């Protein structure tokens, strides 16, 4: 069985039901149910279902836990580093993410693995479509794709990715970043724990592809990683609810 995710551009794809739809038990450990989370402090996170989100709940094998019904403990501080914006400007990652809750995925534009970069971008586009229907989500979320293939993914290439994928750029903040060279991106990858190895042929020549593990990182406004989604757990409903859970947490702290 398959489910089609909405996407704003050329990375539309089908997701295996055994992937997004069937979440491993270990992944649920990050979402710890708690009776102590305030239910009505500060601005209330709106249930995505009530907003008419761009998915059908019947396509999923399980119901996503509602925002605020669990906690997302900080995992570690997200690493920083110098990157290039899609317009060629040098930027610090911390500055680019500042002020919003961020979703960060490391990709390369030549990736053809259906469970790799195209999956991450398709889910980003689905979340962007959700944010376009949810003003609170749109005002507080940033989607960030970072290339680990700077030899090919120059700023103009990343600008084209933005043009293709960011269907609601007027409402939802997107960043498409790259690096000057591999030496600049390597410490950032290592800091996040993002595995990436260039593929080579029998003679040791690069093939232009990479072996990598898909990870999407949820980062709060304080620059802390709050969740890490793998291909088997990259459910757009859960990601949206996780963002709203962080917003409820912020409101609860502000109201104390």
Image: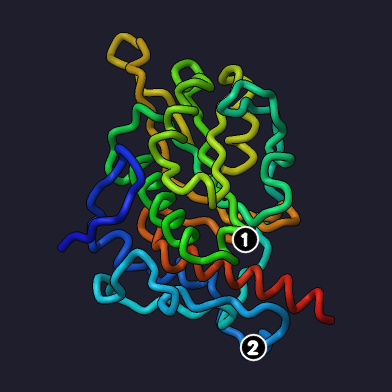
Residue 39 got which mark? 2
Q: Residues within 10 Å of mark 1 (few under 14, many from 20)?
A: many
**Which circle's residue, 1 or 2, is located before the other in the chain?**
2
Residue drawn at 41 percent across, 62 percent down: 236
Q: Is residue 175 left or right of residue 24?
A: right
Q: Look at the picture and state if 28 lies above or below 92.
A: below
Percent coordinates x, y for residue 40 in the rendering = 67, 87
Q: Look at the picture and state if 229 lies above or below 106.
A: below
- Secondary structure state at the residue bearing disc 1: strand
Q: Look at the picture and state if 106 lies above or below 64.
A: above
Nearer to us of marks 1 and 2 is: 2
Q: Quadrant of residue 137?
A: bottom right
**Which image quarter holds the N terminus?**
bottom left
Residue drawn at 37 percent across, 14 percent down: 206
Residue drawn at 50 percent across, 38 percent down: 106
Q: Is residue 150 left or right of residue 13?
A: right
Q: Residues within 10 Å of mark 2 (few under 14, many from 20)?
A: some
Q: Quadrant of residue 49?
A: bottom left
**Which image quarter holds the C terminus?**
bottom right
- Secondary structure state at the residue bearing disc 2: loop
């Amino acid at each position: 069985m398959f489910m089609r995710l909405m996407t704003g551009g050329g990375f539309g794809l089908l997701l295996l039901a055994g992937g997004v739809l069937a979440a491993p038990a270990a992944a649920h450990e990050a979402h710890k149910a708690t009776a102590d989370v305030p239910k009505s402090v500060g601005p209330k996170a709106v249930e995505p279902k009530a907003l008419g989100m761009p998915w059908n709940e019947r396509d999923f094998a399980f119901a996503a836990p509602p925002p605020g019904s669990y906690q997302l403990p900080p995992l570690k501080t997200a690493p920083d580093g110098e990157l290039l914006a899609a317009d060629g400007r040098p930027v610090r990652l911390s500055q680019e993410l500042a002020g919003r809750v961020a979703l960060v995925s490391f990709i390369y534009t030549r990736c053809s693995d259906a469970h790799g970069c195209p999956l991450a971008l398709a889910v980003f586009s689905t979340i962007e479509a959700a944010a376009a229907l949810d003003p609170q989500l749109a005002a507080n979320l940033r989607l960030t794709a970072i290339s680990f293939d700077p030899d090919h993914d120059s700023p103009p290439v990343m600008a084209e990715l933005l043009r293709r994928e960011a269907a609601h750029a007027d409402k939802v903040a997107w960043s498409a970043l790259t690096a000057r060279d591999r030496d600049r991106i390597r410490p950032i990858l290592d800091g996040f724990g993002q595995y990436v190895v260039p593929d080579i042929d029998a003679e040791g020549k690069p093939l232009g592809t990479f072996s990598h593990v898909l990870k999407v990182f949820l980062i709060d406004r304080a620059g802390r990683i709050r969740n890490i989604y793998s291909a088997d757990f990259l459910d757009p409903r859960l990601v949206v609810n996780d963002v709203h859970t962080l917003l409820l947490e912020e409101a609860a702290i502000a109201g104390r």
